[in-house]
Image: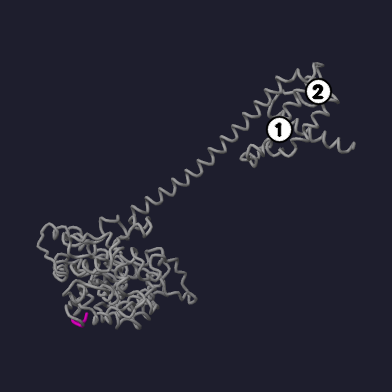
């Protein structure tokens, strides 16, 4: 028993030291008599399990009143100290009642302050997290459109198949497509400014809102928009995302892609896009670069389900814009998802996309292909042609003046300079260029471009990368078909 009492006394001595730290000047066990020490040890036994509370732990601050009913350690020590002081002075336990009450009050004040601070920290952390989420949602909504922030079920119409068929039958749906970084956004923006065209512009914000593939859940996007860093190397065989998706044969959607066709699929798609279209305008415009290899599917999709009486098929038209493959490759490499891709791989992807487009043209009722270099050189001329193709008048001088004023000059020359710098700096690039011309030079020339770009220097060299000098006999070529299988080759 002697050893147990010594251990109890040692524990109490430690607690008394802690009390002295909390309440400087309070009586300590040095003033205790044997009787008062025994009494304080008894109190210490009752409050032993509350030791963490005094030492700053907040584990028990949230306990229910029933769980915190026993005397707190601080209360017990304050009472014991008061009793010890009274015993030492010969005045008995009652003489220290006032000091004990004061100690208890101080201990309770300390606990209340701890609870208040912990509660404030809790709410500050949660409110800070909510504020951060709100700011991030606001920034993304501003940059990319609110459809990237709000859940899809909130951004959807509730039209049935018949209602959707009536809308489709009374409008012209125009899809713009082409390679990424090939001029699709420029062309979409110019067309969307026309008073008779409803694009997604102005309805959802800015940024990616022009690309309908991001505002739907009817057909797959093959990793576009969710791209991760391309690490290169032979081991990377995943054909998904920008610069690679066309290598996947499944990404070529046609009228045989039955899993994504049908009246229900058409209604589902329109109810998503219809949120952003103004149906008071006759032409409903949508742009996604992969439309150049999804055109047959989209045409079949709009024909799915009922249409108005006497309307044999939907009025769906396609405008494809293309650009020199090396300019497309160098511009694509500026994106974080694609900065490690090889130019030769991006050119090969360009060729595959254009072969899909050529194959699909023969199945489309109305398609027009233009070259980015031509459009930016003569924007008014080409916008007149495109608007006439979709059935609109381009007589508004204010609109045409805006087109000419806002069109930037051909920027291919800067991509030419960057590509030539790579070839000159790295012999490996020069070897890859030679192999690229051998493998894809003839294919690229079929679409109106010269792949063997000369890096000798001088103004003539920069000009050789431009469409008006590099495309030769193909300059100005385009396809304009109003009947199935119609139109000339590029």
Q: Pinpoint residue 265: horizontal percent, then vertical percent.
A: 32, 71
- Residue 71 badge: 1
State whether residue 42 is above or below residue 454.
above
Q: Pinpoint residue 141: horizontal percent, then vertical percent.
A: 35, 53
- Residue 31 badge: 2
Left or right, 30 with respect to 409, comes to: right
Q: Pinpoint residue 330: horizontal percent, then vertical percent.
A: 34, 68
Structural crowding at the residue carrying mark 1, measured as other residues with C-alpha within 10 Å and reported as few (<14), some (14–19) or many (≥20): some
Distance from disc 1 to disc 2, alpha carbons, whole Å, reads 23 Å
Residue pictured at 10% horizontal, 59% vertical: 397
Q: Is residue 460 magenta?
A: no
The answer to which quarter of the image holds residue 302 is bottom left
Q: Secondary structure at mark 2?
A: helix
Magenta region: which residues? Answer: 485-490
Residue pictured at 41% horizontal, 48% vertical: 134
Q: Secondary structure at mark 1?
A: loop
In-front residue for pair 236/419: 236
Left or right, 96 with respect to 476, comes to: right
Left or right, 20 with respect to 422, comes to: right
Q: Is residue 488 magenta?
A: yes
The answer to which quarter of the image holds residue 470 is bottom left
Q: Which colour scheme appears in the figure?
A: one colour
Look at discs 1 and 2 and give the one toward the viewer: 1
In-front residue for pair 150/354: 150
Q: Pinpoint residue 181: horizontal percent, then vertical percent.
A: 31, 67
State whether residue 287 is above or below residue 41.
below
């Amino acid at each position: 028993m002697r050893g147990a009492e010594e251990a109890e006394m040692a524990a109490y001595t430690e607690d008394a030291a802690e009390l002295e730290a909390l309440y400087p000047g309070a009586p300590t066990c040095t003033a205790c008599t044997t009787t008062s020490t025994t009494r304080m040890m008894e109190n210490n036994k009752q409050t032993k399990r509350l030791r963490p509370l005094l030492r700053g732990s907040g584990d028990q601050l949230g306990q229910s009143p029933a769980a915190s009913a026993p005397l707190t350690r601080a209360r017990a020590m304050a009472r014991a100290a008061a009793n010890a002081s009274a015993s030492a002075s010969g005045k008995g336990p009652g003489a220290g009642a006032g000091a004990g009450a004061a100690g208890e009050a101080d201990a309770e004040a300390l606990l209340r302050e701890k609870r208040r601070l912990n509660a404030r920290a809790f709410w500050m952390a949660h409110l800070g997290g909510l504020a951060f989420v709100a700011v991030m949602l606001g920034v993304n909504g501003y940059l990319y459109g609110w459809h990237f922030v709000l859940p899809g079920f909130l951004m959807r119409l509730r039209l049935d198949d018949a209602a959707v068929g009536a809308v489709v039958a009374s409008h012209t749906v125009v899809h713009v497509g082409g390679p990424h970084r090939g001029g699709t956004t420029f062309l979409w923006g110019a067309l969307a400014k026309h008073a008779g065209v409803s694009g997604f512009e102005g309805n959802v914000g800015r940024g990616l809102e022009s690309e309908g593939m991001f505002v739907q859940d009817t057909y797959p996007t093959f990793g576009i928009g969710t791209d991760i860093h391309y690490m290169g190397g032979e081991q990377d065989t995943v054909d998904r995302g920008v610069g690679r998706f066309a290598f996947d044969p499944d990404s070529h959607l046609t009228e045989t892609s039955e899993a994504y066709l049908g009246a229900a699929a058409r209604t589902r798609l329109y109810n998503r896009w219809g949120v952003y279209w103004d149906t008071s305008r006759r032409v409903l415009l949508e742009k996604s670069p992969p439309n150049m290899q999804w055109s047959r599917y989209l045409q079949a999709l709009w024909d799915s389900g009922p249409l108005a009486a006497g309307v044999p098929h939907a009025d769906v038209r396609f405008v494809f814009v293309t650009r020199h493959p090396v300019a497309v490759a160098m511009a694509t490499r500026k994106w974080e998802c694609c900065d490690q891709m090889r130019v030769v791989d991006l050119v090969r992807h360009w060729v595959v996309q254009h072969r899909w487009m050529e194959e699909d043209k023969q199945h489309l009722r109305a398609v027009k292909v233009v070259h980015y270099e031509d459009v930016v050189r003569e924007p008014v001329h080409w916008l007149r042609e495109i608007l006439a193709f979709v059935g609109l008048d381009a007589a508004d001088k204010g609109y045409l003046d805006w087109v000419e004023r806002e069109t930037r000059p051909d920027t291919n020359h800067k991509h030419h300079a960057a590509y030539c710098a790579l070839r000159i700096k790295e012999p490996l690039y020069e070897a890859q260029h030679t192999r690229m011309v051998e493998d894809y030079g003839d294919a690229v020339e079929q679409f109106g471009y010269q792949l063997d770009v000369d890096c000798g220097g001088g103004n003539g060299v920069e000009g050789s990368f431009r469409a008006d000098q590099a495309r030769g006999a193909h300059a100005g070529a385009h396809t304009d078909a109003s009947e199935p299988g119609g139109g000339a080759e590029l």
